[in-house]
Amino acid sequence: MRNLDIQKSSIPKHSIALGAMLGLVLGMTSLPALAGPHKPNTSTTDVPVKMVVTVKARHGEQVPVVAEADVKVYQRDKQNMVTSWVPLQGDRAGLQLFILIDDSARDSFALQFSSIAKFIDEQPPSTSIGIGYMHNGMVTPTQELTTDRALAQKALRLPIGVAAGAPSPYLALSDLMKKWPQTADRREILMFTSGIDALGGGLSSDPYTNPYLEEALNRAQRGGFIIYSIYTPTAGSGGRGSFRGTLSQTGLDILAQKTGGETYYLGYGAPVDITSYLADVSYSLKHQYELTFLAKATNKPSLEPIKVKTEMSNTGLRTAENGYVGSGM
């Protein structure tokens, strides 16, 4: 036994060291790679998606300057890579803005014409403005898109009122968007309507069962339209202080939220003065960016849930809830 022990102990020390080094190398190759900094998901199937984002201060009127590095985009909770973040100002300030008026509105709506005319006059030269009236599920333009402020202002006329019946504002909205030519400029819409839609939402104007609202939402998000609305009561007593009025305003809220716009109302009556509402619309139009990011391609072009976030203090980002993502083919 002693001779055996001696033989074991006589194994060269350099062999032991070599074995230890080999074991260490093998162990290192089997360990998982250390986690590096988190990076957005990218792949060869990613496709570029463009969306307009409105930046607003949560408190006060001073809007923070947001840099590309301050913006994060998520598609189904997976972070995507931002490739461009361009302020829509200067040579990129092009905007096509259509003002839609519900022809079933009350005659008293004419009291707001001076505020609307002032709003039109205050828009920058890079903004083209059109005026149209909604009735019978369609839009009749009284002025096509123009940079001539006087022409746009002259196109305002009294609504038809009760004689217009109960038109569908959402069917008319889709009619306008369907006929709107493609352009590199932003496309945004300001609606004056009660949101009451007896054609699509039934007597209650229920927005959750309205196929015309659903169609308008789909078309707006696919086309990148941003929609604002100012609640404007219809002629007669329909919708005033009622459950129907609540649902009609809810429909306008849904339309604005899902397209990145805003809704303005105070109760169910006609606002005495809409100047502050129009000022907020102008404020939004002046603080918008074009966001481009790489999204995971889908089997066919579809609307995908998108969230745009920033960790900057006192800064809110508003955009459509869904982005139009291509197939990558």
Image: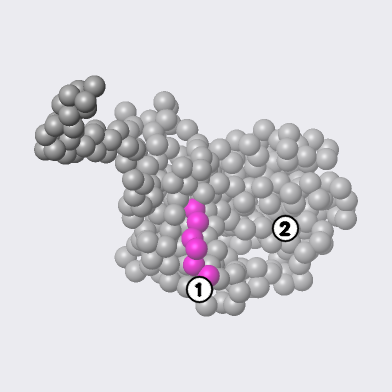
Q: Do the residues bearing badges 1 and 2 touch, measured as CB atoms within 8 Å?
A: no
Q: Is residue 302 left or right of residue 229?
A: left
Q: Position of residue 329 (x, y in %)?
A: 32, 28
Which amino acid, mark 1?
Val
Mark 1 lies on a secondary structure that is loop
| Dominant secondary structure, magenta | loop
* Number of marks: 2
Per the model, the C-alpha gap separating discs 1 and 2 is 26 Å
Q: Quadrant of residue 41?
A: top left
Q: Quadrant of the N terminus?
A: top left
Q: Which residues are magenta?
A: 308-313
- Choose between 311 and 300: the one closer to the eye: 311
Most extreme residue toward the front is: 2
Query: Which residue is disc 1 drawn over?
Result: 63
- Residue 32 colored in magenta in the image: no
Q: Is residue 66 above or below residue 12?
A: below
Query: Which residue is disc 2 drawn over?
Result: 231
- Choose between 14 and 228: the one closer to the eye: 14
Which amino acid, mark 2?
Tyr
Mark 2 lies on a secondary structure that is strand
Q: Is residue 238 visible?
A: no
